[in-house]
Amino acid sequence: MIRVLIADDQSMVRTGFQMILESQEDIEVVADVADGVAAVTKARELRPDVCLLDIRMPGLDGLEVTRRLAGPDVADPFKVVVVTTFDLDEYVHTALRNGASGFLLKDAGPALLIEAVRAADRGDALVSPQITVRLLKHFDGGGARRAVDPPKEPLTARELDVVRAAARGLTNTEIGGELFLSLSTVKTHLAAVQGKIGARNRVEIAAWAWRSGLMD
């Protein structure tokens, strides 16, 4: 079972998300809370597999909760998916910088919500398709190449192929299908790239690809 915590200040949203997620045999909602402080407390107490966080909440907003649960200073980070009504670049940028595994708009639909939870649980990152490329381009200042730290070791041609696919928002399964690679091989390439460029997850890999000009 994938154990999920939902944090949103609107009770109807929490109830709706819970009904959608618990319609799946492999997903269980272990807690739903209405504010950021409770989200941090409950997450640390229950250790859910995935945390679904709204951005605008009382106490602590979802961006700060993400930092506390999944940020670079967290020894054992949680998998966080930010789910929000607000399609704003600064929110996306901050959420991903703070360690979020995905960013989803509330109007994305039930199927995408379910897939975002499953993707986060297996180590993938899922972002609403309508904002994927735009938000990743945000990391390069809208198209201008920015200086990035060089990889510790050069990336192989196949690793570069995988990075480009990930930066386009493809899941591991989609990357494997496009490049004719097994799922385990895709994961191996991504893990190697993380080590070479110092990224914590696939979102940071994608951001690095846009910043470095690899997607020009």
Image: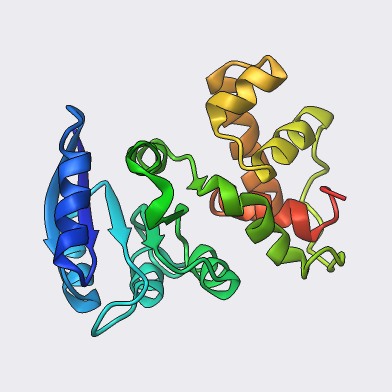
Q: Nearer the viewer, residue 92 or 71?
A: 92
Q: Which quadrant of the figure has residue 6?
A: bottom left
Q: Is residue 5 visible?
A: yes
Colour scheme: rainbow
Q: Check the image and report above or below for 84 versus 154.
A: below
The percent coordinates of residue 77 (x first, y second) are 36, 58
The percent coordinates of residue 75 (x first, y second) are 37, 62
The percent coordinates of residue 15 (x first, y second) are 14, 54
Residue depicted at 74% across the width and 33% down the height: 159
Please state if 211 lies on the left or on the right of 77 as rendered: right
Please state if 143 lies on the left or on the right of 173 as rendered: right
> Can you name the residue that lies furthest to the bottom here?
59
Q: Is residue 45 visible?
A: no
The image quadrant where one finds the N terminus is top left
Please state if 96 lies on the left or on the right of 197 as rendered: left
Q: Which quadrant of the figure has residue 89?
A: bottom right
Residue depicted at 56% across the width and 45% down the height: 129
Residue depicted at 68% across the width and 14% down the height: 180
Q: Check the image and report above or below for 12 versus 164.
A: below
The percent coordinates of residue 68 (x first, y second) are 35, 72
Please state if 111 lies on the left or on the right of 27 as rendered: right
Q: Check the image and report above or below for 131 versus 86.
A: above
Residue depicted at 47% across the width and 62% down the height: 99
Label tally: 0
